[in-house]
Image (cartoon, helix red, strand yellow):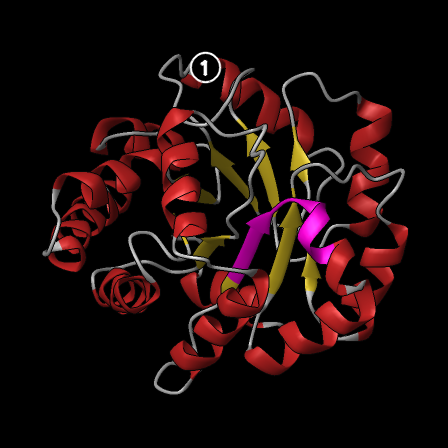
Amino acid sequence: MSRIQQTFQSLDGAKALIPYITAGDPDLKTTLALMHSMVENGADILELGVPFSDPMADGPTIQRAAERALANGVSLSDVLSLVKAFRQTDNRTPVMLMGYLNPIHKMGYETFARAAAEAGVDGVLTVDSPIETITPLYQALKQNQIDCIFLIAPTTSEARMQTIAQHAGGFVYYVSLKGVTGSARLDTDEVSRKIELLRKYINIPIGVGFGINNAESAQKIATVADAVIVGSRLIQEIENNAGREAEAVGVLIKTLKDAIRG
């Protein structure tokens, strides 16, 4: 059983909080401090963004974070080293990577999967790698006991949901709206209807992200989903609190966790 599965099982029906930050923003040392602060304040699973030059699914907030990380020279190898450093003092909290296929393809699927497993990565989500083309990466991850996490969009067909259900590991990431990260047009009723449909085919936890930017929206999503995923709002805290990023993000994480507990 993977760390992600163990975490959801240990929650015993309570809802998970999955915060997203971009690795290397504002620098790798601060990212490590942020990871520990988020766990200390209630994060259940950590989602690390791998900086990429063309983050097509991300809005301006996360794009800026990627640009700052890339300006620092942060690479995929650096992100794996960061996870390895985190594992020196935390061997319990699941860490998943979210990013784009190009850096992984460049490293090589099998090389990446082995290195990720050695570093302590639990799950990988590649935004631009659909189910039809993901087989080489999927197989490499599976051989190294890493969950392959899939996105499901509001426009995903039922037939496609069934195909994803056969391959998805850890949890399924439901994108709550049409658009990029950081959008604010969250329709909880529509999300609820879609999750009800998803549960016909998906027998692993369902997390919801995109558009969740405060305690109120987190609480609403927690009533229908198994996990609440927050990203752009955390990046804003990092931007607005230079020198005290870990403290500021920790306060926000605690607020979100308290709201989810309801």
Q: Percent position (x, y) of residue 201?
A: 76, 37
Identify the secondary structure beneath mark 1: helix
Residue 228 position by quadrant = top left
Q: Is 217 situated left or right of 152 in this image? A: left
Instruction: Name the outermost residue toward the bottom.
Output: 88
* Residue under numbered circle 1: 189
Task: Note whether residue 78 is visible.
Answer: yes
Q: Split into 4 quadrants, where in the image is the N terminus?
A: bottom right
- Name the residue located 73 percent from the left edge and 33 percent from the top edge: 200
Q: Percent position (x, y) of residue 66?
A: 44, 43
Indicate the amino acid at tag 1: Asp
Q: Is 88 situated left or right of 144 in this image? A: left
Q: Percent position (x, y) of residue 2?
A: 62, 72
Q: Split into 4 quadrants, where in the image is the C terminus?
A: top left
Residue 229 position by quadrant = top left
Given residues 171 and 196, the one toward you in this image is 171
The magenta-colored residue range is 96-104
- Name the residue located 38 percent from the left edge and 37 percent from the top edge: 222
Q: Percent position (x, y) of residue 35?
A: 32, 64
Above or below, comparing residue 241 to residue 148 in the picture: above
